[in-house]
Amino acid sequence: MLNVILVVVGLILLTIGIVWLIDRFVPKKLKPILNILLWALIVFLGYITFMSVYGEIKFNKLKEERYRIVIKKLEDIREAQLAHRTVTGKFSGDFDKLITFVDTAKFTITQRRDTTVVDEELTKRFGGVETTKDIVIVDTLGFVPVKDSLFGVDTRYKTMMNVPVGEPNAKFEIKAGKLDDSNISTFEVSVAKKVILFDQDKNFIAKEEQVVAVDGVNGPKLQVGSLEEASTTGNWPKNYTTKSKDD
């Protein structure tokens, strides 16, 4: 966009120069008409310059608003996935199964306590001299529904597969797997930026897909988790999850 602005500014300056030349060298009869045309051109080019800058400002504001909404949904999905791994030992690669899990599964509430017991093997080895050892006992105290623990009475998890803004009826892409040569479970949930920003200027979207910045969402999509590494974080910077005064 900077190149476009520089070109337009250059044209404005050139036009102003032409107006000055006309004022100096063109016959008086033609001056009013040419001056009106050239000043109209200057106003038009100034408008284009303003809209180029203002258009990108509007795009960035809308982009950030939509990203924040999508990120909140991705954070909900991450919480559901972490609960799924806690209970089942792995992540889910299917939204319907993940939703059913949240609806029906329960966390086991346990309590760990240290205690001392007789070590029978050592006691026998030492000819009946009582020998003790320290152990940890895990007591099951009860069960708590995953749904209540994560979402309370809110049922928003039932539509976790839906991208909340952008292209109508768009869905998040969900995948699950394991790291190569290991038993570490992984997952990845993502949506393309062009889906979130589908109704915006294509040039702005193309530029946004190439972003590489500390305070930006790098790459062509928003995602949480990764199939290539043991990560459950998102690819957005902290400023997108910092609560605003209106939250």
Image: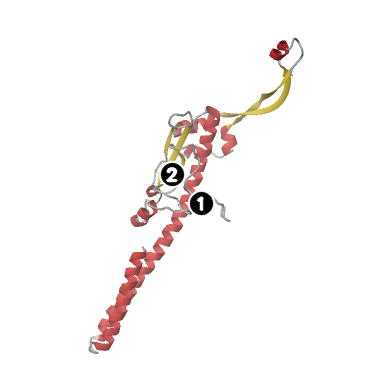
Q: Which label was assigned to residue 240?
A: 1
- Element at label 1: helix
* Residue drawn 38% across the image and 68% down it: 50
Mark count: 2
Q: Is residue 234 above or below residue 214?
A: above
User: In x, y percent, where is residue 24?
Assistant: 27, 88
84 relative position to 193: left or right: right
240 relative position to 166: left or right: right
**Depth order, front residue of 133/238:** 133
> Residue type at mark 2?
Val
Q: Which label was assigned to residue 3?
A: none
- Element at label 2: loop
Circle 1: is it few (<14), some (14-19), or many (20+) Cα within 10 Å?
A: some
Q: Is residue 21 visible?
A: yes
> Residue type at mark 1?
Tyr
Q: Is residue 48 visible?
A: no
* Residue drawn 27% across the image and 84% down it: 21
User: In x, y percent, where is residue 53?
Assistant: 40, 65
Q: Which label was assigned to residue 163?
A: 2
* Residue drawn 68% across the image and 24% down it: 136
